[in-house]
Amino acid sequence: MAAHTGGLTATVPETGTAAVRISGLVRAFGERRVLDGLDLSLRAGEFVAMLGRSGSGKSTLLRALAGLDHDAGGEGELSAPDHVSVVFQDARLLPWKRVLANVTLGLSGADAQERARTALAEVGLAGREDAWPVELSGGEQQRVSLARSLVREPQLLLADEPFGALDALTRARMHTLLARLYERHRPAVLLVTHDVDEAIALADRVVVLDGGHIAADLPVDLAAPRRPGTPEYAVLRERLLVRLGVEVPSG
Ligand SMILES: Nc1ncnc2c1ncn2[C@@H]1O[C@H](COP(=O)(O)OP(=O)(O)OP(=O)(O)O)[C@@H](O)[C@H]1O
């Protein structure tokens, strides 16, 4: 394991099973401590969803984990695997490159094209390799973004509200797709979302970021399919909403 740390102190986890280990992480912008002594670990292959109010520091944490926060002058320890992929809310495809070229970008090896074709087929885009990004719908572009991430076989997939810009039906389809890809590839996943139901549907654990640290950390012990309507689902959902400061109507 290598650490992406900016100015942070990095440690390599002692056990081989932790995909992410963060301890006492502080990230301040001026006087404001956005992350203030944050502790969080993810096991290899674990799927964790992160909820938190707007401005609570979710993207800041993901950027630090992705090694994108080069100015991080914080304190604490943070370690992440070598192979990290990030999916953002917007697909961030290069408009002047065709779909296949967007997926192979930066890939090495004689089989790069073949791997990219396989990844595109996995996300349901076989036959669209030669399309330009502008010819794809928002959901299709996000599929390309997922293919581009997974073709690198990351040990850690960071997803920052990847489905936030999609309509409800497309989002539901993307949940099914992500769940299938996760079963097949088994990276550790840290998914940032505003959608409590999305978090419960997909994750093994849901954490809530508040006040610069993890304010709640709840396992999702619900049988599949996790559909709203069962008492257990309602209890978990309400606990999360309360932690998010959302008033839950009684009765
Ligand atoms: N480069 C920066 N310089 C100054 N302040 C910053 C910087 N990056 C983030 N912040 C501040 O840190 C706080 C947390 O931002 P962040 O984007 O991590 O929140 P978030 O939880 O992802 O929010 P949202 O849910 O709205 O996307 C915000 O108040 C933001 O203004």
Image (cartoon, grey):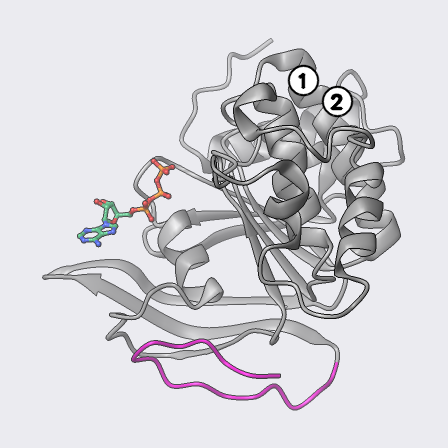
Disc sitting over residue 173 in the figure: 2
- Please give the residue where the numbered disc 1 appears in the rendered image: 170
Question: Whole-percent x and y of residue 89?
Answer: 48, 35
Name the amino acid type tagged 2.
Arg
Instruction: Give the SS element for disc 2.
Output: helix
Q: Nearer the viewer, residue 35 or 101?
A: 101
Location of residue 85 in the rendering, given as x and y in whole percent from the top left corner:
59, 58
Residue drawn at the location 44% of the way across and 85% of the way down:
10
Where residue 9 sits, quadrant-wise, is bottom left
Q: Is residue 202 above or below residue 108?
A: above
Residue shown at 61% from the left, 86% from the top: 13
**Callouts 1 and 2 close, C-beta under 8 Å:** yes
9, above or below 158, in the image: below
Q: Residue visible at 29% across and 80% down?
A: 7
Q: Is residue 195 left or right of residue 218?
A: left
Q: Main secondary structure of the magenta part?
A: loop
Q: Quadrant of the N terminus?
A: bottom right
Query: Does dot 1 land on a helix, a strand or a loop?
Result: helix
